[in-house]
Image: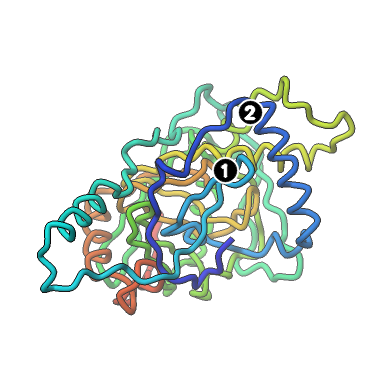
């Protein structure tokens, strides 16, 4: 896990290091082994510390014990001397271009449910221990799963319209709609921009602008995480008979780390500190981003919003990096539910 202010990096050749694990049994054993090491090395409270999706940004994806992890590449880009016009140099450049990360080779994450939810659902928003509620909590009963909600972000860089999909992730949409109506997002900055081939996002929703802030409550993941977890065939995984439900779920989540998908340009998803720790931070995909299906999808960016995001991305990241604060501040002046 990288800190929120991790410096930029480029994905290494993903195809060289990513190899699907042969069977559920192997993946289950390896995920369980990883879980045991994880729980043995870190306190549970530390694991709940907010980390943004950009913690995975610009990542080098490496295969370790059947699971992938994302590690920052702290080194600078290799620079070819301007006067080097040799055939060898040209060949190196050609090889580098051929090895560029290609997000289009990954399957898109699910944005539509295989089976529709009931017309209404009950949501749960748990108070985050040790923090104050900044805007109360959203309503929890009879939350609609039908239709869409439009939220218009008026930023200093231009408009970003978001169409939120209740059918996909009703409790997430309910939370974002509620926070917007409470003016929670007003006068806040989008604190992070990533521009690497593997991750192209603008991250917003933290009133502190640090990547660690939130509303004081947390809620569960929805699509695609819930369907992906339910779709894992646990038969033959050789899980211990006495494994508790929490450890089982964490094992399955680690398995999903080995199954990255593509969050397409125009999609919106929640940043989190791990599954079921969603708060208020979300990321806007202005390009295709490859991540495990552990981030709740909940809507689409309109055309005007994508134009605004393209302009923001074109200006780049502060200091010429590929991961960090936008070179030119992006401030949400207001977020209005239409």
Compared with residue 135, is residue 18 higher up or lower down, i.e. above or below? above
Question: Residue 280's spot in the image, x, y percent?
Answer: 54, 60
Question: Residue 320's spot in the image, x, y percent?
Answer: 30, 75
Looking at marks 2 and 1 on the same chain, the residue that comes earlier in the sequence is marked by 2
- Which disc number belongs to residue 257? 1
Location of mark 2 (residue): 230
Secondary structure category for the residue under label 2: helix
Give the residue at x 47% y 44%: 17
Secondary structure category for the residue under label 1: loop
How many circles with numbers are drawn on the protein?
A: 2
Indicate the quadrant where residue 144 lies: top right
- Which disc number belongs to residue 55? none
Question: Residue 147's spot in the image, x, y percent?
Answer: 43, 35
Left or right of 227 in this view: 243: right
Give the residue at x 31% y 53%: 286
Is residue 181 in view?
A: no
Give the Cα distance between marks 2 and 1. 15 Å
Q: Is residue 64 or residue 301 the one in the foreground?
A: 64
Left or right of 174 in this view: 29: right
Q: Is residue 175 or residue 56 the one in the foreground?
A: 56
Mark 1 closeness class: few <14, some 14–19, many ≥20 residues within 10 Å: some
């Amino acid at each position: 896990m990288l800190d929120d202010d991790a410096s930029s990096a480029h994905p290494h050749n993903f195809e060289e290091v990513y190899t699907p694990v042969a069977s559920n049994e192997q993946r289950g054993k390896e995920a369980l082994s990883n879980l045991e090491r994880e729980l043995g090395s870190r306190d549970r409270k530390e694991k709940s510390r907010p980390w943004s999706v950009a913690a995975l940004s610009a990542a080098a994806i490496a295969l370790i014990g059947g699971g992938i992890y994302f590690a920052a590449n702290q080194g600078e880009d290799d620079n070819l001397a301007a006067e080097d016009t040799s055939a060898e140099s040209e060949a190196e450049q050609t090889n580098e271009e051929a090895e560029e990360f290609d997000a289009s080779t990954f399957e898109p994450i699910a944005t539509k449910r295989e089976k529709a939810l009931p017309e209404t659902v009950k949501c749960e928003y748990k108070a985050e221990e040790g923090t104050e509620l900044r805007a109360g909590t959203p309503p929890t009963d009879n939350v609609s799963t039908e239709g869409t909600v439009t939220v218009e972000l008026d930023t200093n860089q231009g408009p970003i319209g978001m169409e939120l999909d209740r059918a996909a992730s009703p409790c997430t949409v309910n939370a974002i709609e509620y926070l917007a109506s409470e003016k929670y997002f007003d006068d806040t900055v989008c604190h992070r921009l990533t521009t690497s081939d593997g991750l192209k996002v603008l991250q917003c929703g933290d009133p502190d602008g640090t990547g660690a802030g939130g509303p004081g409550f947390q809620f569960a993941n929805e699509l695609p995480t819930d369907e992906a977890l339910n779709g894992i065939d646990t038969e033959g995984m050789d899980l211990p008979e006495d494994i508790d439900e929490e450890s089982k779920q964490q094992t399955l989540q680690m398995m999903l780390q080995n199954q990255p998908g593509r969050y397409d340009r125009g999609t919106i998803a929640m940043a989190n500190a791990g599954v079921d720790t969603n708060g208020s931070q979300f990321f806007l995909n202005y390009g295709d981003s490859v991540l495990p299906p552990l981030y709740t999808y909940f809507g689409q960016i309109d055309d005007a919003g994508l134009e605004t995001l393209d302009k923001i991305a074109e200006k780049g990241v502060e200091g010429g990096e590929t991961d960090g604060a936008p070179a030119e501040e992006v401030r949400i002046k207001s977020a209005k539910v239409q």
